[in-house]
Image (cartoon, grey):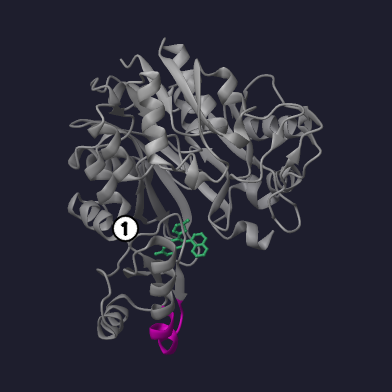
Amino acid sequence: MFKKVLIANRGEIALRVIRACRDIGVRSVAVHSTADADALHVRFADEKVCIGPPPARQSYNNIPALISAAEVTGADAVHPGYGFLAENAEFAEVVQKCGLHWIGPQPELMRLMGDKVSARKAMEAAGVPVVPGSPIIETDHQAEEAVERIGLPVIIKATGGGGGRGMKIVENKTRLLAQLASARAEAQAGFNNPAVYLERYIGAPRHIEVQVLGDGSAAIAMGERECSIQRRHQKLIEEAPSVALDDARRVELLRTARKATAAIGYRTVGTLEFLLDEEKHFYFIEMNTRIQVEHTVTEAVFGVDLVREQMRLAAGDPLRLHPDMRPRGHAIEVRINAEDPVTFAPSPGLITALNLPGGPGVRVDTHIYAHYRVPPYYDSLLAKLIVHGENRHVALARLRRALGEVVVEGIKTNVELHKRVIDHPDFIAGRFDTHFLERL
Ligand code: MV4
C-alpha cells in the first residue's frame, strides 16, 4: 500500500479520502488555495501545502503546483477526488511520469472514455447496448443521413462533453443544420473540440448508473444507483437500489456492466451511466472514470469503503470482493447546496449557526462547520446527507427526520426543496424520471 497520498482536491471529498487513508494507516497531504487556508481538509490531513490563489486554474487545476507539492512532501500517490483534474488523462500521465501512483484507472482508458464517441464504440464492442446514434458528424449530408436512419427527435452531443453539457435536442429537420452549427461552436468554446455526434433522443428517461470495480482483468458490478432527480445536469438525490428495475432487468444490467468493465481491462473504480426508457430498455451513455459524489449510497447498502477499495486496486491488489454481493436495504443521498431557493444562484458566505443530523442510519459527509465561511470560488456542495434503512420506506422516514434536524444559518440552502421532493406522492411512489424537478 502507499505510504503517503496527496489529495488533489478540496471540500467533503478531500476529507473523505483523508478518512480512508487514516483507516488503513496511510499518511495524507492536503493541498489548498489561499481561499481554503481554514478548510477542514487542511486541518485533518497530516501535512498541507498551499498551491496557489483562489481561482481553480491557478490552484486545484494547476498541474505543476500539484506535482511540486507531491515532491516536496514525499508523497508516493495522488488521489484526484471528483471534479477538477479527476478525469484529466494528461494529469494522470504526468503523475505517473513523475514516479507517483495514480489513484484512478489507466490514463489510456480515461482518454478512451473522455471521448464520448470512442466510449460508445468501445462499449458497443463489449456487447453493451448503446443509444442508436452516429459517429462524429463532419458534413451536413452526414447529419441528414444520420437523422434519416435514427429518426426524430435526435440529440446533438459534444464528443468532448459529458455530464449533459453542450447538448441540443432536434425536434424538427428544418432546424437540424442551424443547431448543428451552433452545437459545434459551443463545443469548441466549451471543450476546445468542435466534434459532435447524434443520438436518438429519449424523451423521459431515468438515469441509472452502475458502480464497477476492476483489477485490470476481473471486474464486479456493485449494484446500481438511481440518479434521475437532477436539475441542469446536477444530481440532487440519488438512491440505491433503483425502484425502476425488477430482478431480471437488474441482473441483465449488472451482468452487462461487469462484462464490459472486464473486457476493457479496467482498473480501480468507475461508473457506467445508462438511460432507461419507458419500456425499461437500458442504453449506455457515458463512463465516469472517477469516484463519484454519490458513491456513498452504494457504500451504505453494500457495507464497503469504496475509496479504500479504489486505493487497493490502484496499488495493484487483486479484486477480493465476492462477484455477486447482495445489497442490504435501501440508501438515499441528498446533496445540500449553498444556493438561493428561488434563483438557484450560489449563496456563499459565513455560516452563523449549524446543526447536522445524526442517529440511526444517518451519515453526513461535509467539510462545513459553525462560523465557516463558504468561499465563492468553488462548487456549492455543502454536505451530503445519506440515510440507510431496511427498505425504502424506512430510509425515507429517516431522511425526513434527518432533514428536520438540519440547521444552516447565514447562507441560503436547498434543504426546503429536498423536503418538498421527498414528501411528493410521485417521489414516494417511485414514479419519476429526469424531468421530475421541472414539473415540481
Ligand atoms: C440523453 C437524453 C435523451 N436521449 N441522451 C446525458 C447526460 C445527462 N446529464 C443528461 N443526458 C441526457 N442524455 C439521449 N440519447 C437526455 C438527457 C437528459 C437531458 C437532456 C437535455 C436536457 C435536460 C436533460 C435532463 C436529463 C437528462
**What residue do we see at 30% from left, 33% from top?**
95
Asked whether, in this view, residue 353 is left or right of residue 232, the answer is: right
Q: Is residue 399 magenta?
A: no
Residue 252 in view in this figure:
no
Reply above or below: 248 against 323.
Answer: below
Residue 88 in view in this figure:
yes
Q: Nearer the viewer, residue 327 or 88?
A: 88
Q: Nearer the viewer, residue 262 or 373?
A: 373
Q: Position of residue 129 (x, y in %)?
A: 28, 56
**What residue do we see at 24% from left, 68% from top?**
135
The residue range painted magenta reads 170-179
Q: Where the N terminus falls, by quadrant?
A: top left
Reply above or below: 137 against 397.
Answer: below
**What residue do we see at 27% from left, 61% from top?**
117
Instruction: Tell me the SS state at disc 1.
Output: helix
Q: Is mark 1 within 8 Å of ligand 1?
A: no
Q: Nearer the viewer, residue 393 or 359?
A: 359
Q: Where the C terminus falls, by quadrant?
A: bottom right
> Label 1, on which residue?
116
Q: Position of residue 380 (x, y in %)?
A: 63, 44
Magenta part, dominant SS: helix
Asked whether, in this view, residue 90 is left or right of residue 345, the answer is: left
Q: How many discs appear? A: 1
Q: Position of residue 357 (x, y in %)?
A: 72, 25
Name of the residue lying farthest toward the top:
25
Amino acid type for the residue under numbered disc 1? Lys
Q: Is residue 175 magenta?
A: yes
Reply above or below: 431 against 350.
Answer: below
Q: Nearer the viewer, residue 6 or 296?
A: 6
Q: Position of residue 427 (x, y in %)?
A: 64, 48
